[in-house]
Amino acid sequence: MGDVLGPDSISDLPQSIIESILVKLPIRDAVKTSILSSKWRYKWASMSHLVFDEKSVPSCNDREVAEQSFVKFIAGTLFLHQGSIHKFQITNPNLQTCPEIDQWILFLSRNDIKELILELGEGEFFRVPSCLFNCKKLTRLEVSRCELDPPLSFKGFMYLKCLNLHQVLISPDAIQSLISNCPLLESLSLSYVDSLALTVRAPNLKHLCLEGEFKDICLEDTPLLVEIYLAMYMTDDIAEQFEQSSKCNFVKFLGGVPNLEKLVGLIDFTKYLSIGNDPRPRPIMYNKLETIELYQVSFEDMKEILVVLRLITSSPNLKELQISGSSNIPTAIDTPDLDFWEKECPSNATLRQLKVVKLTEMCGVPHEMEFIKFLLGCSPELETMMITSSAYDMEIQLKMLIELLKFRRASTRAEIVFVHE
């Protein structure tokens, strides 16, 4: 190879190509390339992407020694670095709060940092220094187990597109201001936040992930949202507070997202949407919504069933539907008011694009079976319906199977797969 290309021809490659090679290596190995030749001694020092994790330093059984080694390695790397740093990431569950992080963030704020990711270990929350808010060119910010307190002079991150806060201590006013003052924000993730009343105003937001005990959620200016993932842990106090409100949660949360393509609602989501007085305006149509996943739906609660029906009948291009139930057999087996389905289901409802249905935690209660009957009867393109039963009684399972065989199918190709958990 040396006879054809010369003894060190790779060193003469453009810096951009060399960096594309180096960033594919763990940073520990990238630094080791300095021993290849004199030309390679400081090639790594101009890398614009610096990612540090547990593998950046040799493994050690002594946690304190490992942490000191990790901190020393990062400090040494930054000391020798040349040029701009566009991405800086620390992912180390063993790293606790340390004063050196403040110095690193100050250094980064002066080096055109664009992506900052801090995933620290358990223990005391790290209080992020105010110099973070001087990183004017940030496009991505992800922090976990940190405390954020934007200074009064902070006017927002004008270029931020992705914001991910996991187990972060921040005041309600500060989070509202932070979201509203990031005009280009496209992706927002808030997880394990507690007792937060959140109003989201983000006209360019496309992806939203929320998980925690929220007092309230309102999507006020989010017309471009295409994907929502929500897990809402409702305490009894919060549920009671919602019940006393006259506002319709369905309208507040989903009333202004016409471009939605995927909706995933986990714990207490349908319960949350069902609360409030629905004035029954002309329903919004979700013409782009293709995937709906709803978990722990109570088929004992008529309001929750109405939420599910409203969603699927307002989504003419729905292709995949996944729902898990949470019914209690002893209390739900004699569920009354089956006239509900004739009253509430449009006689001409047709789910023309629905191809795949997955129903889990089904125990055969009447309203579950009526829902299955409705889906089979109005889905002419249905290919697969998988039903996972949570009923342990063989008699109940047999009864479910007999009923399923009686139901009319709009699709001649529909395959029903019945599975016992």
Image: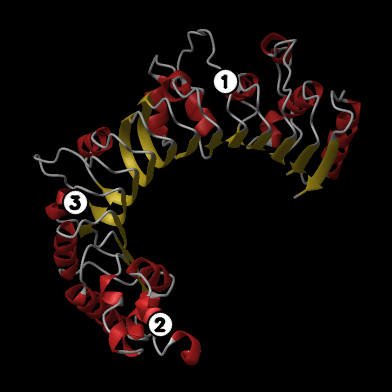
Quadrant of residue 83 within the rendered picture: bottom left
What residue is disc 3 on?
135
Distance of label 2 from label 1 (alpha carbons): 71 Å
Percent coordinates x, y for residue 110 in the rendering? 14, 59
Q: Could you classify mark 1 by the number of other residues whose Cα lies within 10 Å: few (under 14), some (14-19), or many (20 or more)?
A: some
> Which quarter of the picture shows residue 395?
top right
In the rendered image, which residue does mark 1 sit on? 303
Residue at which label 2 appears: 9
> Mark 3 against mark 2, which lies toward the viewer?
2
| Left or right of 130, for residue 295 | right
Residue 175, percent from left and from top: 25, 39
Q: How is the image coloured?
A: secondary structure
Describe the element under mark 3 as helix, strand or loop. Answer: loop
Residue reaching furthest left?
153
Q: Position of residue 57 (x, y in %)?
A: 34, 82
Front position in the image: 280 or 186: 186
Q: Up-down: is 332 above or below 358? A: above
Residue at point 30%, 69% (across, down): 47
Local crowd at mark 2 within 10 Å, few (<14), some, or many (≥20)?
few
Measuring 48% from the left and 36% from the top, which residue is drawn there? Answer: 228
Q: Looking at numbered disc 1 in the image, what kind of residue is underneath it?
A: Lys
Q: Are marks 3 and 2 in contact (CB under 8 Å)?
A: no
Query: Closer to the observer: label 2 or label 1?
Result: 2
Secondary structure state at the residue bearing disc 1: helix
Label 2 element class? helix
Q: Earlier in the sequence, mark 3 or mark 2?
A: 2
Q: Amino acid at mark 2?
A: Ser
| Disc 3: CA contacts within 10 A as few (<14), some (14-19) or many (>=20) | many
